Amino acid sequence: MMKPLLIVRDTDSLVLGVMWHEDPDDGPIKPQAGPLPGTRLVPHGEEFTREGRRDTESAYWRDGAIEWEDHAVLEDERAAAIDAIDAAGEALRLAVISRMTQTPEYVRAEQHAREYRAAGYPEGEDAYVPPGVASWAMAKWRQAWTARQAADDILATADRWYALLDEIRALRLANKEDARHAATAGEVAAIVADMRADMQSLALQINTTTTE
């Protein structure tokens, strides 16, 4: 009696077809053909057929059972996920930029702080301290801040904003690439869910990154 064995590709568990073997339960058998390179043979209790399946569907052997995936639907889900990731990333990026540049004052203060640091933090009665730095040092008179401390604080805050933008970009790009290579609709959904959770975590940082 002949017994069907599924030909399953090792790399992704795609079912390539069926190979018929004599059933070893029937007694001694002659040598049988082995699996093709890069594949394995898997016993399956039911007949494997593509009847009623679309040309865009493929079978996969997962967790001891056959799962069918429609690649046309999967491509649509991948595209929708990529759009969702881009939209979430852009919304968060604009939120950061809005906080960074909500008034020309903050942009000007950062510029002044960078100029002051580039000049070597000049001090003394005749030293020029840009007004964006001087005003923050004066406001911190209770802590006796120097102009250098004020400039460094302004730049530390700005750098936190830039680091947050870098995190958003890295998260957006990584999740988009993961979505492009997702093997199943479930993987696509999981990627989007994880991305949204990560974005929410970054959004909380926007509210805790303060300016002077």
Image (cartoon, rainbow, N blue to C red):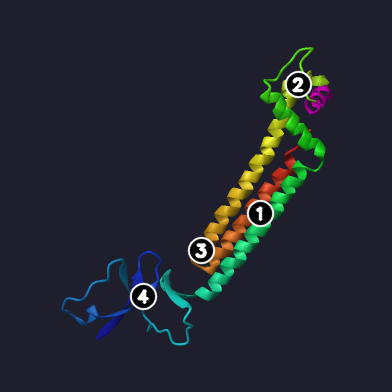
Magenta stretch, residue numbers = 131-140
Q: Which residue is mark 1?
A: 89
Task: Assess whether mark 1 and mark 3 are in contact (beta carbons under 8 angstroms).
Answer: no
Q: Which residue is mark 2?
A: 147
Query: Which of pointers 3 and 2 lies earlier in the amino acid sequence?
Result: 2
Query: Which of pointers 3 and 4 lies earlier in the amino acid sequence?
Result: 4
* Secondary element at tag 4: strand
Mark 3: few, some, or many residues within 10 Å (few <14, many ≥20)? some
Residue 168: say if magenta: no
Could you say which quadrant of the image residue 22 lies in? bottom left
Q: Quadrant of the N terminus?
A: bottom left
Task: Assess whether mark 2 and mark 4 are in contact (beta carbons under 8 angstroms).
Answer: no
> Is residue 153 among the parts visible in the rendering?
no
Could you say which quadrant of the image residue 151 lies in? top right
**Disc 1/disc 2 C-alpha distance (Å):** 36 Å
Q: Amino acid at mark 4?
A: Leu
Q: In this rendering, would 211 be left or right of 163?
A: right
**Disc 1/disc 4 C-alpha distance (Å):** 39 Å
